[in-house]
Image (cartoon, rainbow, N blue to C red):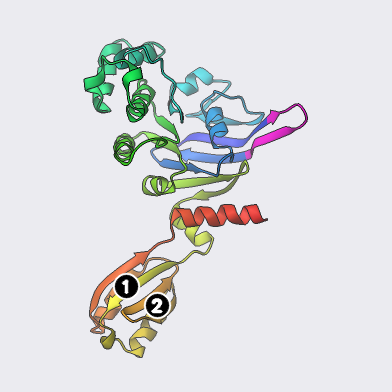
């Protein structure tokens, strides 16, 4: 089931002398329950797209729907399904954390606002700070408070714009766990981040944006195959025990592209991870395998290759 659908979405900012197209006729779908990564260099159009999805900015042309509701024409209904965490959350510092959440709860006419607010403060680990003013919170605490405020209406979709900005490693780990738990409970996550390792760990699919245009949408594994990036396996073995005949058997395996003998074993270049099959062949031929180290193409390598190729063209 599709929960976000963008169709030929375009945003043009008009200047005094010339116009600037921030988002150029992009189309994509986000399926219910997935973690969808939204990537791109600076000024690629990520935040502008998020603002259009959230109904905070009107598209110049095209449309985007949220759970079947147009983000502009059915703005109120669409927003009920969304929890948004902007890159830089803005809070009134003089309010207490618990009161801030109660204030947000009023927008959704929740009957037991304080109970809901307390539950969320406990969930994000700020139950000891419910009666503290927001201005006393650290940056990481404010990020968690932003997460709590985005969950006040039990949204089906959580939209995160650079959620790890300014967080230390402990804060990133805690925030990531909270988001993963929410996804495991069925919440769809739309994640925009420049920390590619974070996206790689969390996302089912990624959409790569460059200069306002989509250049790829797929799983990381499929993107790697499409652009011809290879998996490498370093197989550490008893070099004395391997013969040319055994090497030839490995070379003839499906998906194996190249096999080279090294001082500590063999290096296998392949189109996908075939380490179990390689290990089985070696053991069957009485080759003692110490370990196999598999190096998959990283999202960073894929991202740089795709955006670099487009920038050169």
Which residue bears the numbered disc 1?
277
Residue 269 drawn in magenta: no
Decide: few, some or many residues near mark 1? Use Cα within 10 Å; few <14, some 14-19, many ≥20.
few
Q: Secondary structure at mark 2?
A: loop
- Name which residue lies at 41% across and 12% down: 107
- Name which residue lies at 40% across and 41% down: 34
The x and y percentages for residue 294 are 35, 66
In-image side of 109 versus 207 (left or right): left
Residue contact at pointers 2 and 1, CB within 8 angstroms:
yes
Give the quadrant of the C terminus: bottom right
Foreground residue, 195 or 297? 195
Foreground residue, 222 or 17? 17
The x and y percentages for residue 65 are 53, 30
Give the quadrant of the N terminus: top left
| Span colored in magenta | 13-25
* Main secondary-structure element of the magenta-colored stretch: strand
The x and y percentages for residue 217 are 52, 48
Label of residue 23 in the image: none
What whole-number distance in Å separates the C-alpha atoms at marks 2 and 1? 9 Å
Q: How many marks?
A: 2
Label of residue 253 in the image: 2
The numbered mark, 2 or 1, whose residue comes first in the sequence reads: 2
Foreground residue, 159 or 144? 144
Residue 14 drawn in magenta: yes
Q: Quadrant of residue 32 in the image?
A: top left
Decide: few, some or many residues near mark 2? Use Cα within 10 Å; few <14, some 14-19, many ≥20.
some
Q: Eyeballing the image, is 23 above or below 285?
A: above
Q: Eyeballing the image, is 251 above or below 116?
A: below
Residue extending farthest to the right is 17
- Name which residue lies at 51% across and 40% down: 29
Q: Secondary structure at mark 1?
A: helix
């Amino acid at each position: 089931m599709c929960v976000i659908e963008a169709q030929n979405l375009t945003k043009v900012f008009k200047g005094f002398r010339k116009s600037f197209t921030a988002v150029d006729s992009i189309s994509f779908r986000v399926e219910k329950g997935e973690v969808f990564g939204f990537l791109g260099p600076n000024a690629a159009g990520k935040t502008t797209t998020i603002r259009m999805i959230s109904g905070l900015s009107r598209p110049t042309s095209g449309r985007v729907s949220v759970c079947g509701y147009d983000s502009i024409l059915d703005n109120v209904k669409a927003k009920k399904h969304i929890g948004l965490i902007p890159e830089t959350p803005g809070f009134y510092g003089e309010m207490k954390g618990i009161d801030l959440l109660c204030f947000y709860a009023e927008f959704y006419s929740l009957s037991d606002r304080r109970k809901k607010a307390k539950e969320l403060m406990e969930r994000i680990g700020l139950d000891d700070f419910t009666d503290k003013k927001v201005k006393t919170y650290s940056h990481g605490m404010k990020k968690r408070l932003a997460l709590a405020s985005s969950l006040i209406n039990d949204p089906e979709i959580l939209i995160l714009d650079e959620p790890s900005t300014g967080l230390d490693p402990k804060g990133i780990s805690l925030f990531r766990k909270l988001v993963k738990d929410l996804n495991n409970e069925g919440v769809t996550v739309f994640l925009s981040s420049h920390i590619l390792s974070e996206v790689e760990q969390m996302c089912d699919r990624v959409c790569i944006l460059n200069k306002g245009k989509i250049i790829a949408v797929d799983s990381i594994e499929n993107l790697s195959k499409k652009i011809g990036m290879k998996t490498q396996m370093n197989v550490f073995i008893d070099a004395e025990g391997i013969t040319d005949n055994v090497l030839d058997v490995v070379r003839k395996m499906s998906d194996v592209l190249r096999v080279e003998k090294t001082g500590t074993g063999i290096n296998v270049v392949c189109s996908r991870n075939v380490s179990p099959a390689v290990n089985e062949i070696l053991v069957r031929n009485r080759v003692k395998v110490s370990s196999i180290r598999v190096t998959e193409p990283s999202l960073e390598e894929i991202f740089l290759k795709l955006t670099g190729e487009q920038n050169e063209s």
